[in-house]
Amino acid sequence: MRKTGAILAAVFLACMLLMVPDHISANAVGSSDILVFPADSSSQTVDLGESASYRWILFNNGTSPYYVNATAGTLPDGFSATVEPGRFILNPGNDTLVGVLFRSPPETDLEDVLLTLTVEVSDIDTGDMDSEDFVVRIQLTGRTPEVSHFGKILGVYDNFLPEPLDNRWGAFLITVLIWVAIGLLLIAIVLPTAGRRAKKTENVIDDTIVELVKGPIFAIIVIIGAFSSLDILGLDKDIMSVLETVYGVLIILLLTWVSFHVFRRVLIQYGKSLARKTKSTLDDRLVPIIDKIGAVVIIIVGFVFVIQYFGYDITFFIAGLGVLGLIIAFAAQDTLSNFFSGIHLMLDRPFSVGDRLVLESGETCRVLDVGLRSTKMYDISAHNIIILPNNKVASMKILNETRPDERSRARVDVGVECGADVQKVERLLLEIASSHPNVLKDEGSAPFVRFLEFGDSSLNFMVKCWVDKLTNRGKVESDFRTEINRRFAEEGIDIPFPLTVVKLQRE
C-alpha cells in the first residue's frame, strides 16, 4: 500500500510540475527537505480594484513529516492577501498546493507591489525549523489619475476662477453652488407646475405630497451634488470613507423623514376620510391605532437601515431583540399594561377626544389625547392638565357627560313659604323654564315642575328641563335662579329662610 501511495504521489507531482513554467526551478525552504515550486510566473499584472490568485506547490522530499505555516507578507495600505491553506502537516512523499488570493484597491498611486509568501517549516521528528520567502512582483494597471491642483468645475471643466478661488476648494465651492442652483430651479419651476396641476384635481392627497417633498428633494439634490463633488478635492481615502458614511446616513434619515410624514399626513388622512364615509365605526377605531403603530415602525426601520449601513449584521440584532423582548416583558409590565390598555381604549372608545368626563375622584375634565401609554385630560375647574396611565383609566369608573349626545339635563330646586299657592308656583316655574332659549321644548323633552315635599319651613319644588348643549347647563341653571328670584318678588311669593321655633313652657 505504501509503494502504491508513493507511486500515485509521484505521478500527481509530475502532473503538477507540468504546469510549472520551464524556466522556474524548485527552491528548498532553508536546509529542510521541503521543496517549493512556483505554479505561476514571478511577475504578474493586476487591474486596480481586481483580485488574482498565485499558487505554489510544496513537496516533502524527505523521510520526516513537517509542520508547515504559510503566511503573506506585509502589504501597502488598501491591499490584502489571504493564504489557503495557511497551516498543515506535510508527510514524506506528499505535496500540497498553497494559494494566495491578492486583492487590489480601486485607487492607489503605486505602480507595482511585491507579494511575499513566507513559508515556515518544522521537522516533527527532530524539531528543526527553517523558513524562506518567495516573492511575486505584481504590476498594477489603471492608476488613479492625479487630482488637478486648480480643480475642475463639475469634475469636467477647467477652473477659470480668479484668486482666491483658483484652486481645488474654489472649484469645489462653485460646483456645490451649481448643485444648489439646480435644486432651487427644481423647487421654483418644476414642483410649482406639478402643484398647480394637483390643485385642479378634487383629491387633496397630491397637493399634500407636492408640499411635503419640496424640502427633502432640495436637500437630497444638494447632498448628492456635494458628495459627488468631493473628488475635486482629492481627499485622503480615510476621510472619504468617513464622508461616505455620513452621506449614506443622511440619505437614510431624509428618506425616513419623508416616509414618516407621507404616512401620517397622506395615508392616515386618506384613511380617516374614508372612515368618515363608512357606516361602520371599526375603521374609525383602527385608523388611530395604525397611525401610532405605523409611525413607530417607520422609525424602527430607519434605525435598522442605519445599523446595516454601518456594516452590522441585523440578524444578530433581531435575535437580541427577541431575548430583550422577554426581559422587557417582565421588567416593564406596567408599561406594557398601559400600551395594551391604550389599544383597548382606542378600539372600545368609551370616550373620544373632546368628550367631557367626570372622574371617579370627582374632577370634571375634557379629553385632550389618548396615547399608547397615557391619557391627557384638561381639568375644567382647576385649569390643570391631568395625565393618567391608560391601565388606570381603563379600570376607573368614569361618567361621560358627552354621551349619548350633547344634550344635558338642568335641575333647579326652590322652596317657597308655607301657605303659598302651589298651582301658581308651578305655573311660574314652568313659564320661566319654557321661555329660556337654550331649553328644549319639543315633545318628550319639554320642561316640567314637581312639588317635591313639605320642608321644615318651606314647600319644596323642582324644575327640570333638557338643555341643548352640555356647556350651556350651568348658564341655564344660573338664569333660572335669577329669573325665579325676580318673578317671585313681583308676584309676592317669599322664599323663606330655615326657621326653628322654640317654645318655652313654665311649670
Image (spheres, rainbow, N blue to C red):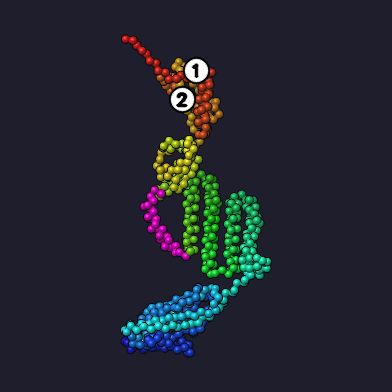
Q: Nearer the viewer, residue 79 or 409?
A: 79
In the rendered image, the vertical position of residue 503 relative to residue 103, given as above or below: above
> Mark 1 or mark 2, which has the lower sequence index?
2
Q: Which residues make up the magenta segment?
A: 311-335
Residue pictured at 52% horizontal, 32% vertical: 472
Q: Residue at x 45, y 64 (%)?
A: 312
**Residue closest to the eye, 429 or 89:** 89
Tell me if label 1 and label 2 are in contact, CB under 8 Å. no
Furthest residue to the top?
Answer: 507
Q: Distance of mark 1 from mark 2, alpha carbons?
A: 15 Å
Question: Residue beneath label 2, please?
Answer: 413
Q: Picture coordinates of residue 329 (x, y %)?
A: 38, 53
Question: Does residue 296 lie above or below 231 as drawn?
Answer: above
Which quarter of the image is occupied by the C terminus? top left
Given residues 97 and 135, the one toward you in this image is 135
Secondary structure under the numbered disc 1 in the rendered image: loop
Badge 1 crowding class, 10 Å Cα cut-off, few under 14, some 14 to 19, many 20 or more, is some
In the image, 278 versus 192, the foreground residue is: 192
Q: Main secondary structure of the magenta part?
A: helix
The three-letter code of the residue at mark 2 reads Asp
Report whether 229 appears left or right of 37: right
Q: Amino acid at mark 1?
A: Ile
